[in-house]
Image: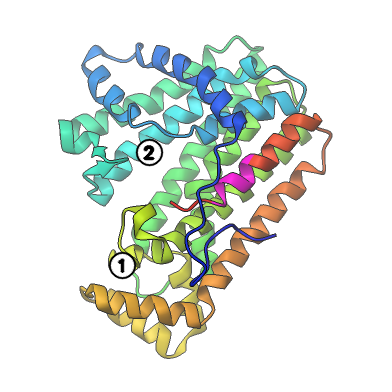
Amino acid sequence: MTTSLAQPGTGRTPPPQVPDALARASSLVVPALDAAVERLDPSLHEPVRHHLAGGGKHVRAGLALIAAAAVGGAEGEAVPGAVAVELVHNYSLLHDDIIDGDRERRHRPTVWAQFGEGVAIVAGDALAALAIQVLLDAPAPAPARMEAARRLADANQAMISGQSADMAFETRDRVTVEECLAMERDKTGALLSAACAIGAVLGGADGATAEALGEYGEHLGIAFQAVDDLLGVWGDPSSTGKPVGADLLARKKTLPVALALGLGGALADELVSIFSRAPDQTEIERTTRLLERAGVRDAVAAIADEHLRQGLGALDRVVLADKPKEELSEVARYVTARDR
């Protein structure tokens, strides 16, 4: 099993087609998400709608709905969970844009750039609070509502921990692969895990089945982030909209950097050197070639493949409906075969 990423000299890999399950999820979740936004203070409607108008594939929402169907429930039963995870995901994007100083997202001005930092912070806070309200108001038995809310709160705390660790890495010369993977498990894997488990809970799953689906989501999140890290160094600029080696240029200590630092030697010393100053694009492109020749690109792809394998393996440990299980597999391969 390999990730569908173009290798040097083979040309660009066409972007994979969005699975039908995600398109179906969007048709169910977008109206419910719009209705939830109506509950916010009217002063926040414009900035939040501006942000949401940027679109997205609603992967997390789709996973929640598919997970509900996989355990024998109806997708509609998990719509509140799907909306809640989308609200948490989007609140984190509002805050991340401020932290990273990004003025554009999906080719549109970010909320802080358009409306100001204060508005973006408060809008993010409001979405985080609204997510719990949506879950607690879900038409599900009280134990299921409470369990879903607990899982979402735990995922939110993990996301915050991951973001904090990521920021702390910026002040360090070296980061280990284990530390990097732990950060990515929290920052990305936690919410994907919660989306799957929450969908299962609202669909009526027992604890073991919800845990297995949550494990699938966690491994999928790590694989997703590993591919994202790979594209941050070797992604096609025509697809990513960023120069080759963008993450190196930004001096981000992502998985390729952690792997290279772990190899030691001249390559590790060079990375430490370029991270201590402002390298130019020529230096960055040379470093990306050195990383590739050292096997770092292949190693990152192998990590993504291994977590994809483990995620799919978690689905085999429990009894799931055939079609939704197939859709979960399709979504997993889709999100780890991105070219952007």
Foreground: 267 or 211?
Answer: 267
The disc placed on residue 92 is 2
Q: Residue at x 57, y 72 (%)?
A: 298
Q: Is residue 304 above or below residue 204?
A: below
Q: CA distance from mark 2 to mark 1?
A: 21 Å
Q: Answer whether residue 287 is magenta in the image.
A: no
How far from the left and from the top, in percent, is residue 136?
53, 16
Amino acid, disc 1: Arg
Q: Residue at x 57, y 51 (%)?
A: 336
How far from the left and from the top, in percent, is residue 133?
46, 17
Residue interval drawn in magenta: 331-337
Tell me the quarter of the picture where residue 329 sits.
top right
Q: Residue at x 58, y 24 (%)?
A: 24
Q: Are marks 2 and 1 in contact (CB under 8 Å)?
A: no
Amino acid, disc 2: Ser
Q: Is residue 126 above or below residue 278?
A: above
Q: Answer whether residue 332 is magenta in the image.
A: yes
Q: Residues within 10 Å of mark 2 (few under 14, many from 20)?
A: many
How far from the left and from the top, in percent, is residue 206?
77, 28
Q: Residue at x 35, y 67 (%)?
A: 245
How far from the left and from the top, in percent, is residue 178?
55, 66
Q: Is residue 157 above or below residue 178?
A: above
Q: Chief secondary structure of the magenta span? A: helix
Question: Label 1, on which residue?
Answer: 251
